[in-house]
Image (spheres, rainbow, N blue to C red):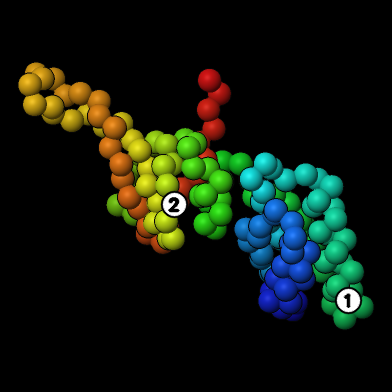
Amino acid sequence: MIDKNVVKTVVEEWLQDKEYFLVDIEVSTDDRIVVEIDHADGVWIEDCVSLSRFIEEHLNRDEEDYELEVGSAGIGQPFKVEQQYINCIGKDVEVLAADGKKVTGVLKSVDGRKFVVTVSEKQTVEGKKRPQLVEVEKEYSMDEVKYCKYLINFK
């Protein structure tokens, strides 16, 4: 079986001096390698091809046969690494909290493994008869939410 750390080392070598970042590497027991990369402005197919060829140059098919797939982290898929959160600051996101509550709002900030989302909630406001929509900041830990993902708007 191909060692995931070997693949990671090769990918990180290719990533040096590029604005891309590694999202995930999976190596299955049948040597299927899946590498996901991302970039603030999106991923170009030419760069996926370049990374794929770079990996193939550094892995020996004579020693182990493998299947290789290189692609971008899917839009609308849950974030896996901190850089994905950072790239979406100011954009709409959906968060599924550990308690099962789903909220949508604007990703306001990221600080280490914590992030803040501004959401609109109905709250009782002094001097008003009916609840009003109020902007509320909610802080989450990346390790404690079930997921956070970019919310695609077709408006």
Residue 60: image tag: 1
Q: Amino acid at mark 1?
A: Asn
Q: Quadrant of the N terminus?
A: bottom right
Residue 9: x percent and y percent? 72, 73
The extreme front residue here reads 17
Residue 115, above or below 61: above
Query: Horizontal placement of 110 versus 77: left or right?
Result: left
The extreme bottom residue here reads 63
**Can residue 94 be spotted in the picture?**
no
Relative depth, front residue between 115 and 69? 115
Residue 121: x percent and y percent? 26, 32
Residue for badge 2? 110
Using the rendered view, name the quadrant where residue 57 is placed: bottom right
Between marks 1 and 2 in the image, the one whose residue lies nearer the viewer: 2
User: Who's the residue at 44% across and 60% down the image?
Assistant: 112
Using the rendered view, name the quadrant where residue 5 is placed: bottom right
Q: Amino acid at mark 2?
A: Val
Residue 65: x percent and y percent? 85, 72
